[in-house]
Image (cartoon, grey):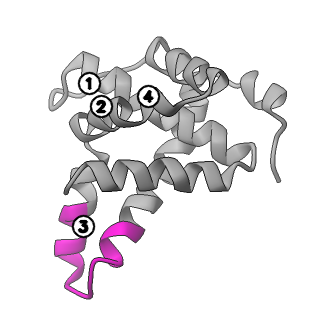
């Protein structure tokens, strides 16, 4: 089931980020899996690097120039969302940008924009090594 953009826009950025977290992690896991057959521990370590706040913060910088006005708005809402508990391992500014990225990926996926999700993740993958 997909939502319209109007329906999805009514969800809080934290809820979109909740969903976007799993969308982004699945993409990260697929990326490392396709790098070659190795042990699961190594794959996990490579995937974790991509889902860290610092990496996702950098990813925002990579895709920000190519976002539509609507996507930039979702990103802004995610960055400014309240009620976020920043883990000790992350800087607050990085964590907010990571949450923004996850909100964007959640929004795009729940509205059925799978090709756009793939496009943005591909740009991130090309620009940022693991």
Circle nearer the viewer, 1 or 3: 1
Question: Which residue is denoted by mark 4 in the rendering?
Answer: 64
Question: Which residue is denoted by mark 3 in the rendering?
Answer: 44
Question: Which residue is denoted by mark 2 in the rendering?
Answer: 57
Circle nearer the viewer, 2 or 4: 4
Q: CA distance from mark 2 to mark 4?
A: 11 Å
Q: Residue 118: x, y in percent?
A: 54, 56
Q: CA distance from mark 3 to mark 4?
A: 27 Å
Q: Residue 100: x, y in percent?
A: 46, 27
Q: What crowding class fits label 1: few (fewer than 14 Cα within 10 Å), some (14-19), or many (20 or more)? A: many
Q: Which badge, 2 or 1, comes first in the chain's sequence?
A: 2
Circle nearer the viewer, 4 or 1: 4
Pick out the residue farthest to the bottom.
37
* Helix, strand or loop under label 4: helix
Q: Which badge, 4 or 1, comes first in the chain's sequence?
A: 4
Q: Is residue 45 magenta?
A: yes
Q: CA distance from mark 2 to mark 1?
A: 5 Å
Quadrant of the image occupied by residue 114? bottom right
Q: In the rendered view, does 60 fall on the left or right side of 111? A: left
Q: Residue 47: x, y in percent?
A: 28, 61
- Is residue 105 shown above or below 32? above
Q: Which badge, 2 or 4, comes first in the chain's sequence?
A: 2
Secondary structure mainly formed by the magenta segment: helix
Q: Which residue is drawn at the image coordinates 59% and 23% (left, top)?
A: 74
Q: What crowding class fits label 2: few (fewer than 14 Cα within 10 Å), some (14-19), or many (20 or more)? A: many
* Helix, strand or loop under label 1: helix
* Helix, strand or loop under label 2: helix
Question: Which residue is denoted by mark 1 in the rendering?
Answer: 94
Q: In the rendered view, does 58 fall on the left or right side of 74? A: left
Q: Which residue is drawn at the image coordinates 44% and 27% (left, top)?
A: 65
Q: In the rendered view, does 47 fall on the left or right side of 70? A: left
Return the mark for residue 120: none
């Amino acid at each position: 089931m997909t939502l319209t953009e109007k329906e999805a826009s009514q969800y809080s950025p934290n809820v979109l980020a909740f969903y976007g977290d799993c969308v982004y992690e699945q993409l990260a896991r697929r990326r490392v899996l396709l790098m070659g057959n190795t042990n699961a521990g190594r794959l996990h370590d490579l995937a974790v690097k991509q889902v860290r706040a610092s990496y996702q913060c950098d990813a925002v910088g990579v895709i920000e120039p190519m976002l539509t006005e609507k996507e930039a708005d979702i990103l802004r809402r995610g960055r400014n969302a309240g009620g976020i508990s920043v883990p000790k391992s992350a800087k607050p500014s990085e964590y907010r940008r990571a949450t923004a990225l996850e909100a964007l990926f959640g929004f795009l996926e729940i509205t059925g924009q799978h090709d756009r999700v793939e496009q943005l993740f591909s740009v991130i993958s090309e620009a940022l090594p693991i």
